[in-house]
Amino acid sequence: MDVLYFAWVRERIGLPKERVETTAVTVAELIEELMARDERYAAAFGDLSALRVALDQELAEFDAPLSGVREVAFFPPMTGG
């Protein structure tokens, strides 16, 4: 699946997008796999309250299943104005 990173998440990881092979069943499991890669991922995902996730461009929760998902995007909460 494609994993996209936006704003400060992208800055901490150093990539805008990557292709990930995973055995994760949920978003939370995917995050655990990514955090185990190295300290850049651990820093980016250290505080989930500061993150939002979208699956195939639909906002989702961290316990959402990944079955059939082609794209996961991580980004900080958006504010209106």
Image: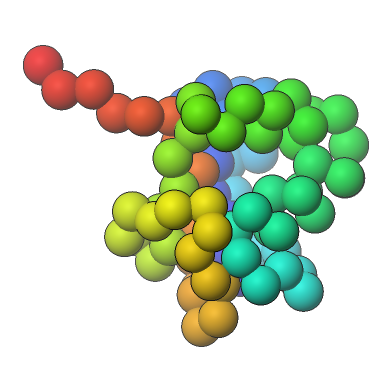
Horizontal relation, residue 69 to residue 40: left or right: left
- The N terminus, quarter of image: bottom right
- The C terminus, quarter of image: top left
Horizontal relation, residue 70 to residue 59: left or right: right
Q: Position of residue 3 (x, y in %)?
A: 58, 56
Q: Position of residue 66 (x, y in %)?
A: 56, 72
Q: Nearer the viewer, residue 12 or 32?
A: 32
Q: Farthest residue in the front direction?
A: 63
Q: Nearer the viewer, residue 21 or 15?
A: 21
Q: Residue 11 occupies which quadrant of the picture?
A: top right
Q: Looking at the picture, does residue 30 appear above or below residue 17?
A: below
Q: Is residue 15 visible?
A: yes
Residue at image point 52% right, 52% down:
62
Tag count in the figure?
0
Residue at image point 88% right, 45% down:
37
Residue at image point 72% right, 69% down:
24
Q: Position of residue 30 (x, y in %)?
A: 69, 58
Q: Looking at the picture, does residue 64 appear above or below residue 3?
A: below
Q: How was the colour assigned to the protein in this rendering? A: rainbow
Q: Residue 26 occupies which quadrant of the picture?
A: bottom right
Q: Position of residue 75 (x, y in %)?
A: 46, 36
Horizontal relation, residue 11 to residue 41: left or right: left
Q: Farthest residue in the bottom direction?
A: 68
Q: Residue 22 occupies which quadrant of the picture?
A: bottom right
